Amino acid sequence: MDHILVVGASGAGLTAADALRREGFTGRLTLVGEEPHLPYDRPPLSKQLLAGEWQPREATLRPETELQRLRLELRLGCRAAGLDPLARTVTLTGGERLGYDGLVIATGLRPRRLPFGHDLAGVHVLRTLGDALALRDQLLPGNRAVVIGAGFLGSEIAATARGLGLDVDLVDLEATPLAGQVGPQMGELVADLHRRQGVRLHLRRRVAELTGEQGLVTTVVLDDGTRLPAEVVVVAIGSVPATDWLADSGIPLGDGVLCDPTCQAAPGVYAAGDVANWPHPAAGGRVRLEQRTNATQQAIAAARNLLAGPDGATPYAPIPFGWTDQYDTKIQIHGWAPPDARVEVVDGDPRAGRFVARYLREGRVVGVLGWNSPRALLRYRGQLTA
């Protein structure tokens, strides 16, 4: 194998490139990234960088000197437009074709948008460094912000905006924030956390309209007629895998790039990170994990399996791990949090703001959550099986 191409230059893509070198690959290695910036980390975008505590350089994953040690051909500011797995070429938007012997797809996600309102100034999504900087400029004390979507991203943005002194409304279709990430019981505690900080929650509500004046957003209208004044609106209603460039490639697509248990999507083609969808034995089917830790772990697995070849590849079946920081609270979860799981507190006390809870299904521990309890949480992680 002489040339390996990695498409996607965020956490998963850079980790894959690093792992290929660490595993002994000495050939040509090209990293293609759509954004012009050096590879950077995304979790700080909704927290430290958005709050103004970090400058962009602090989110950079590796200084340029370390990237040079990896002997990468960096193709930044270049978007992949097509893939021909038979000819083993990737076409860039300008028409240039890059040949490869092995390919790692790590193109991540694109934010979902409302079917209306995005033409108004003051309406934002948050996925890229540029998005974060544009939003940060509008998070001024006294401004009114409406965050649409109360998953990890939306809840973090609401917490950051509130910490900066904005008046904040948080809207979601579910009955609690983080319903899909931590389940309804723990989601109620997250709701209480936001309410105590002065965030107004509008749950089980849909956005019907965004209105504006002179091209500026002024109001978010909910499906029950409630009108929320706003100078800033952030749409955080989830993301979709960035697979549009693969539409005519023959690569199997569904909710992401459909891989086998070893992360292989086609001969010589592997996927990693938010874009990868693969069968996980503990999940009872296919999964796609939008977690920073998975981006790292899966990129390493994909790189190793690409070098090992189909006969030497091993299945990838991690125990998922995710976290979120909101206000002075750190929530961490290992494993799964099914909505029908029985939840029991096994360490600490929710009333004290520090505890560990287990998620049980059919008598088996399938997930453990720590609320401001990173050390105690580790004692219970061993109860999980991948």
Image: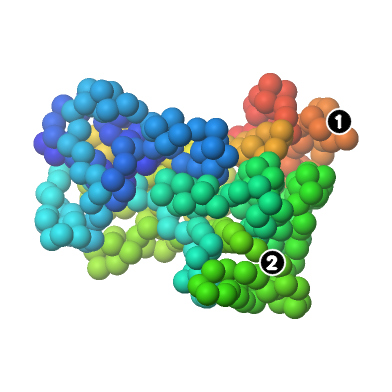
The residue shown at (12%, 55%) is: 97
The residue shown at (70%, 38%) is: 327
* Relative side of 289 to 224, left or right: left
* Relative side of 275 to 143, left or right: left
Q: In the figure, 245 relative to 47: above or below?
A: below
Classify the position of the N terminus by image quarter.
Answer: top left
Q: Report crowding for label 2: few under 14, some 14 to 19, many 20 or more residues within 10 A (C-alpha).
A: some
Q: Is there any visible trace of residue 52 in the rendered image? A: yes
Q: Nearer the viewer, residue 266 or 376?
A: 376
Tag 1's secondary structure?
helix
Tag 2's secondary structure?
strand
Q: Report crowding for label 1: few under 14, some 14 to 19, many 20 or more residues within 10 A (C-alpha).
A: few
To which quarter of the image does residue 94 belong? bottom left
What x and y, as percent, mark residue 259?
Answer: 37, 52
Q: Earlier in the sequence, mark 1 or mark 2?
A: 2
Q: Which residue, given by chain and number where applicable, does mark 1 sit on?
A: 352
What x and y, as percent, mark residue 202?
Answer: 75, 63
Q: Which amino acid lies under the numbered mark 2 shown in the image of this protein?
A: Pro
* Relative side of 7 to 200, left or right: left
Q: Which residue, given by chain and number where applicable, does mark 2 sit on?
A: 229
Q: CA distance from mark 1 to mark 2?
A: 35 Å
Classify the position of the C terminus by image quarter.
Answer: top right
Q: Which amino acid lies under the numbered mark 1 shown in the image of this protein?
A: Ala
The residue shown at (42%, 45%) is: 129
Q: In the figure, 57 relative to 107: above or below?
A: above
To which quarter of the image does residue 213 belong? bottom right
Q: In the figure, 48 relative to 155: above or below?
A: above
Q: Nearer the viewer, residue 149 or 21?
A: 149
Q: Nearer the viewer, residue 203 or 342?
A: 203
* Relative side of 289 to 219, left or right: left
The residue shown at (75%, 52%) is: 199
